[in-house]
Image (spheres, rainbow, N blue to C red):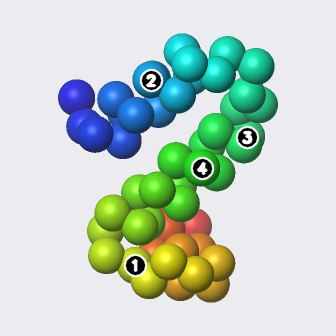
Amino acid sequence: MSIIKTLHTLIKQSLPDIHAARLNALMAAVESGLTGASVSITSLGRARAGT
């Protein structure tokens, strides 16, 4: 299991009331940061995988 999936599961268990869209946005930002993107809103969005 990848670190992102593991982190996603742990956060979902720890914060059961978090909205799914907010959790997905958080995971996208974390994944972008882990891939070496600069930690700014613009660069995290550009480094995000997918469309």
Task: Tell me if 37 is positioned left or right of 24 in this view.
Answer: left
The three-letter code of the residue at mark 2 reads Leu
Residue 46 visible to the viewer: no
Q: Quadrant of the N terminus?
A: top left
Which residue is at a point 47% across and 32% down the rendered structure image?
Answer: 8
Mark 3 and mark 2 in contact? Answer it, CB < 8 Å: no
Q: Nearer the viewer, mark 1 or mark 3?
A: 1
Q: Where residue 48 is drawn, which disc sits there? A: none
Give the structural element (helix, strand or loop) at label 1: loop
Give the residue displayed 57% in from the left and 67% down from the top.
Answer: 51
Q: How far apart are the two marked residues, 3 and 2, measured between alpha carbons?
A: 16 Å
Please give the residue where the numbered disc 4 appears in the rendered image: 26
Residue 15 picture location, percent across and down: 64, 22
Residue 33 horizontal side relative to residue 14, left or right: left
Label 1: few (<14), some or many (≥20) within 10 Å? some
Number of residues whose C-alpha sits closer than 10 Å to that of mark 2, classed few (under 14), some (14–19) or many (20 or more): few
What residue would you read off at disc 3?
A: 21
Query: What is the CA distance from the residue labelled 1 to the residue labelled 3?
Result: 22 Å
